[in-house]
Image (spheres, rainbow, N blue to C red):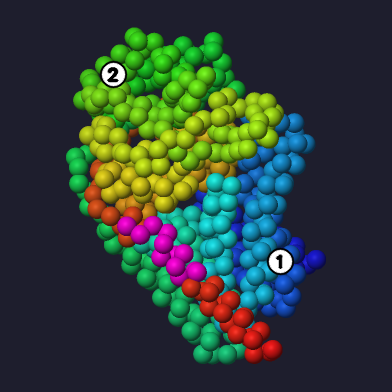
Amino acid sequence: MLALAASFAAGILAVGGFAPFNLYPLSMLGLALLFWQWHFTTTVRTGFLTGLAFGLGFFGSGVSWIFISLHIYGGMTAWLAGLATALFCSFLALFIACVGALFVFLRQRDTALLWLAPALWVFQEGARGWILTGFPWLALGYSQTPNSPLAGFAPLFGVYGVSYFSALLASLLVWSLSHRRMRAPMLWGLCGSALLLVSGWGLYMQSWTIPASRVSSVALVQGNIAQEMKWHPEKTAETLALYARLATAHPAQLIIFPETALPIFESDIPVAYREKLIQIGQQNSGDIVAGLPTGSPSGAYYNSVLSFGSAPTQAYHKFHLVPFGEYIPLKFLLGWVIEVLHIPLSDFSRGSATPSPLQVGGQLVAMNICYEDVFGEEIIRQLPEATVLANVSNDAWFGDSLALWQHAQISQMRALESGRMMLRATNTGLTAIINHKGELLAYLPPFTRGVLQGTVTGYAGSTPYVRWGNAPVWLVCGLMLGIAFLKKRTRWTNRR
């Protein structure tokens, strides 16, 4: 029981590396404590249970905001929302539990800690980011953005590459401590750790992209419309007037409204209001980009972004939809969930998987909506053509929780991977301007109404990650696992 309690506590400790705490060594320290247990574990069962305990602490503390989404804004009763959150966190914890069991099963020698444990860790993150359309939240690499030296690996190998090197650093720490009475292994471990940190720092200093387009003025509007009031028909005119007023008072070449900022379908926008938005954009020699639903509630409809202004109207339709939030999987069987959650417009259609950047405000903008920026390999589909990244979100669903800061940190990783600035326009926060190194240049406090003004520089060129995506990471991890299984098979054959 003591070992399980220690693993549970290590999982909670690891969350300290993520935003808003940003104590990035804690994530590697928490993982090192787990690796320490696996390193000395002799049974597959113990490896599974310690991994499960770590996962319950990690996800139970790191994504507890799901309860807020389900209960406060989704309308679930407290007990049902608590149960659903607990089951979801337990499901996520199973991925880490399976890693622990598999590590102990495949381990032949203690050196497996150095090459097998990091590969298995990253594979579970990849599997978690794929199964059931994916939930790659709290991938270890995000905790290193942008302050850790290991963040320098992001433009080459993406967030999963940073996760790999973070796990490798944790395993090197365990290796050094477990061989502290043996001078040579301990020195090799310490030298390997130093080499990783110095290499990451050197790569972070490298410029992978170059300024390419003129600087554009930007205004990111944070309307701070209460989620429970957002879709009330009697509030629609007030909401539309608010956004028009804020856009008029804060002129910029590129004005961005949040996800579904205009709570009506495009076909229902009053002609006078549409013309007003176009006029504001033209007066600024630029464009307004606004989130709103398009299509028809009686047919296919989309979570979209439209442009209004100097350029002809352009559209982006969200591709990666959130299960049960934006579409209902197996609708014939699970359609009743719509009634339980009380989420407006819960069955969006999917947009194109290969969208084109929007030519607005003097930039080529790679749009993504809310949860889409969690999937780095999907963001780079619009690159290298796009000069700027932009995310519009309605994170009001998360309340005043860790999720607001975690989501902003994810956007910081996307900027670092692509070598491009990221603009975030959100309903309740965190609205932010992020530079091409993943650093927060400016942001608005959550749950305040305002407009964040600044400038954005377009960048050209491709980082290695833009060219290769996650392929190098999966290749290396696949090779490590292949070697482990081959060794295991050889050992079985020799025994026979």
Q: Earlier in the sequence, mark 2 or mark 1?
A: 1
Three-letter residue code for mark 1? Phe
Q: Secondary structure at mark 1?
A: helix
The x and y percentages for residue 324 are: 61, 36
Magenta highlight: main SS? helix
In the rendered image, the quadrant that contains the C terminus is: bottom right
In the rendered image, the quadrant that contains the N terminus is: bottom right
Q: Residue at x 43, y 14 (%)?
A: 268
Q: Find out whether residue 469 is within the magenta segment.
A: yes
Identify the residue position indicated by label 2 in the image: 278
Task: Choose top left, top right, bottom left or bottom right for residue 287.
Answer: top left
Q: Find out whether residue 314 is within the magenta segment.
A: no
Q: Secondary structure at mark 2?
A: helix
Q: Residue at x 54, y 52 (%)?
A: 130
Left or right of 495 on screen, residue 32: left
Q: Residue at x 35, y 47 (%)?
A: 381
| Picture disc at residue 399 | none
| Picture disc at residue 48 | 1
Q: Is residue 225 above or below residue 361?
A: above
The x and y percentages for residue 151 are: 41, 60
Task: Choose top left, top right, bottom left or bottom right for residue 95.
Answer: bottom right
The x and y percentages for residue 330 are: 63, 38
Asked if marks 2 and 1 touch (Cβ < 8 Å), the reply is: no
Left or right of 436 on screen, residue 264: right
Q: Is residue 162 above or below residue 91?
A: below
Query: Which one is in front, 194 or 420?
Result: 420
Kindly tell me whether residue 437 is visible in this rendering. Answer: no
Three-letter residue code for mark 2? Ile
Q: Which residues are magenta?
A: 467-478
Kindly tell me whether residue 308 is visible in this rendering. Answer: yes
The x and y percentages for residue 466 are: 33, 55
Q: Residue at x 25, y 25 (%)?
A: 312
